[in-house]
Image (cartoon, rainbow, N blue to C red):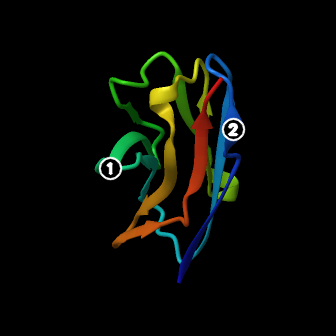
Amino acid sequence: QVQLVESGGGLVQPGGSLRLSCAASGNIFRNNVMGWYRQAPGKQRELVAHITSTGATVHADSVKGRFTISSDKAVNTVFLQMNGLQPEDTAVYYCALLTNRWYWGQGTQVTVSP
């Protein structure tokens, strides 16, 4: 079994910053991809960023230059540093892990509002 535990969501004003964390535990293969997706009300879930076990990263165009994904492989944890947050970034953010299959966290709410 694999568990993903997220933390770091909350309410922030436009232009503010938040840092999300996701700790993975359980039967995690050496080669994997961890990342963050988000889903706003009435919209489909979309990729925010992901990072491979070799450190290669992909960021969605909408967050490039503002968000940065990183990881600490020693503790199987992935981070998402979010700077310059805007109201359109409001969503539930989900941690995801791809090993032999997809695993998902429970989601953490990020709300950007004056």
Q: Looking at numbered disc 2 in the image, what kind of residue is underneath it?
A: Leu
Quarter of the figure with residue 15 = top right
Q: Mark 2 and mark 1 in contact? Answer it, CB < 8 Å.
A: no
Mark 2 crowd level (few <14, some 14–19, many ≥20, 10 Å Cα): some
Q: Which residue is mark 2?
A: 11
Residue at 68 percent of width and 21 percent of height: 16
Q: Nearer the viewer, residue 17 or 27?
A: 17
Relative to 22, does residue 19 appear above or below in the rendering? above
Going by the picture, which residue comes out furthest to the left?
44
N-term mark: 2 or 1 = 2
Please count the marks in the image. Answer: 2
Q: Secondary structure at mark 2?
A: strand
Quadrant of the image containing the C terminus: top right
Percent x, y for residue 8? 71, 46
The answer to which image quadrant residue 102 occupies is bottom left
Measured as percent of width and height from the top left, residue 20 is found at 65, 43
Disc 1 crowd, CA 10 A, few/some/many (<14, 14-19, 20+):
few
Which circle marks residue 42 in the picture? Answer: 1
Amino acid on which the number 1 mark rests in the picture:
Gly
Position above or below: 52 against 87 = below
